[in-house]
Image (tube, rainbow, N blue to C red):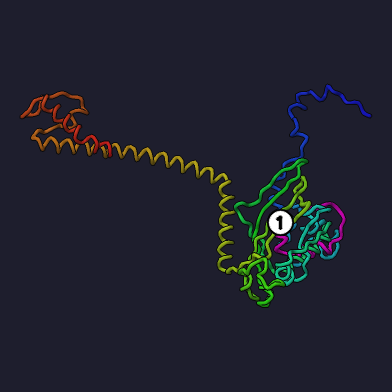
């Protein structure tokens, strides 16, 4: 084998690099983008249809290529991402469909096996959900299409934040992630009352009690929470995806409430972006400066008011005893004759008595 030169292993450059220089780059930001792209895929099943008809070949896809291609052709209604160079339905060097950018080539997903909504949200409420695994982008696309068809026109772009997406970097540079989102869709099933409240052989109540699902009717707007559990490679592409949800906990919702939630989430997203901008930093600095100036001015005004109150109280106390006092005499530092009708000792004694009587009042000001 090739001999190892030990002299090069102890050079300053090699020591400066350390272990970090041999690890893959941090792709946490890419993982967040992939999660958002996954929510977009779940809300737009037609993207999986495009992956089924795509002819595999050429270079791999990336989120940057797909985003750039989507922006360039957003106004072209005849454009279809994917397809070989120059072929109908695509453009020259068009990137593959979005699933090829989100999932790795050998990605594996585990989804419900049910073919109908009555099975997933009816029979399997008691018997439990049957699962099925698929490996490879085209196979998982078929499984996704079958699962998403049970929630027609479902909106998955409702990430629950907090807690948001939790990203754990594991050995080798991969990532294990958890997140939660709500899916909103129109209920398209109608279960008989006897079916929603089954009984056991001995006539006792079922293991799962009756829930709000028993009052759902076809056409109702419903929502369900889904916990996303997935793992990515060093580039942020999904290696596995296994959604977890409770098919016994589906709740009715209102269109107005969902619109308000959507608006609130957009405001929060915009606020987060603005908070990280340079303009926000300058605004915060200016706000701190204004606050400091305001506090300084308030202290000065407070001192002036306290002094005026002190002067007025001294005048009132002196007038009550018939001893006129020039309150400005102490400030100027000039010494004059004692006021008429009294001596210096009497003045000092009255001032001392005034301080004992009203010191607490001045302190409270």
User: Percent x, y for residue 62?
Assistant: 77, 51
Q: Is residue 85 magenta?
A: no
Q: Which residues are magenta?
A: 39-61
Circle 1 Cα neighbour tier, 10 Å, few/some/many (<14 / 14–19 / ≥20): some
Q: Residue 135 at what x, y percent from top left?
A: 83, 57
| Residue 57 can be seen in this image | yes
Residue 53 is a magenta residue: yes
Quarter of the rendering occupied by the C terminus: top left
Q: Residue at 57% x, 61% y: name it.
A: 261
Q: Position of residue 304 (x, y in %)?
A: 27, 37
Nearest to the observer: residue 306 or residue 273: 306
Q: Nearer the viewer, residue 135 or 337?
A: 135
Q: Image quarter for residue 269? A: bottom right
Q: Which residue is mark 1?
A: 37
> Which residue is drawn at the image coordinates 68% and 78% (left, top)?
192
**Residue 198 visible:** no
Residue drawn at 66 percent across, 51 percent down: 165
Residue visible at 70% across and 54% down? 35
- Residue 209: name its quadrant: bottom right
């Amino acid at each position: 084998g090739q001999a190892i030169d030990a002299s090069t292993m102890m050079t300053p450059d090699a020591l400066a690099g350390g272990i970090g220089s041999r690890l893959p780059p941090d792709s946490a930001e890419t993982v967040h983008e992939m999660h958002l792209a996954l929510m977009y895929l779940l809300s737009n099943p037609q993207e999986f249809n495009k992956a089924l008809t795509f002819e595999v070949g050429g270079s791999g896809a990336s989120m940057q290529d797909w985003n750039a291609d989507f922006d360039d052709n957003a106004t072209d209604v005849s454009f279809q991402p994917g397809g070989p160079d120059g072929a109908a339905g695509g453009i020259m060097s068009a990137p593959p469909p979005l699933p090829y950018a989100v999932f790795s080539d050998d990605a594996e997903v585990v989804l419900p096996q049910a073919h109908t909504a009555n099975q997933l949200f009816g029979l399997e409420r008691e018997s439990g959900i049957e699962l099925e695994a698929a490996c490879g982008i085209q196979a998982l696309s078929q499984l996704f299409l079958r699962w998403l068809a049970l929630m027609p026109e479902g909106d998955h772009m409702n990430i629950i934040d907090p807690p948001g997406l939790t990203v754990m970097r594991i050995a080798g540079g991969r990532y294990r992630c958890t997140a939660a989102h709500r899916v909103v869709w129109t209920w398209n099933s109608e279960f008989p009352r006897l079916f929603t409240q089954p009984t056991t052989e001995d006539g006792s109540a079922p293991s799962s009690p009756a829930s709000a699902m028993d009052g759902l009717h076809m056409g109702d707007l419903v929502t369900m929470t889904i916990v996303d559990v997935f793992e990515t490679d060093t580039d942020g592409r999904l290696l596995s995806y296994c959604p977890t949800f409770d098919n016994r906990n589906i709740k009715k919702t209102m269109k107005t409430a969902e619109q308000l939630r959507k608006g609130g989430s957009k405001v929060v997203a915009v606020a987060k972006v603005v908070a990280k901008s340079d303009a926000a930093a300058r605004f915060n600095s200016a706000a701190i400066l204004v606050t400091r100036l305001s506090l300084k001015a308030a202290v000065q005004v407070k001192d002036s008011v306290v002094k005026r109150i002190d002067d007025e109280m001294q005048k009132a106390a002196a007038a009550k005893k018939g001893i006129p006092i020039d309150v400005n005499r102490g400030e100027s530092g000039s010494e004059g004759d004692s006021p008429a009708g009294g001596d210096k000792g009497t003045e000092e004694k009255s001032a001392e008595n005034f301080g004992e009587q009203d010191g607490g009042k001045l302190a409270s000001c």
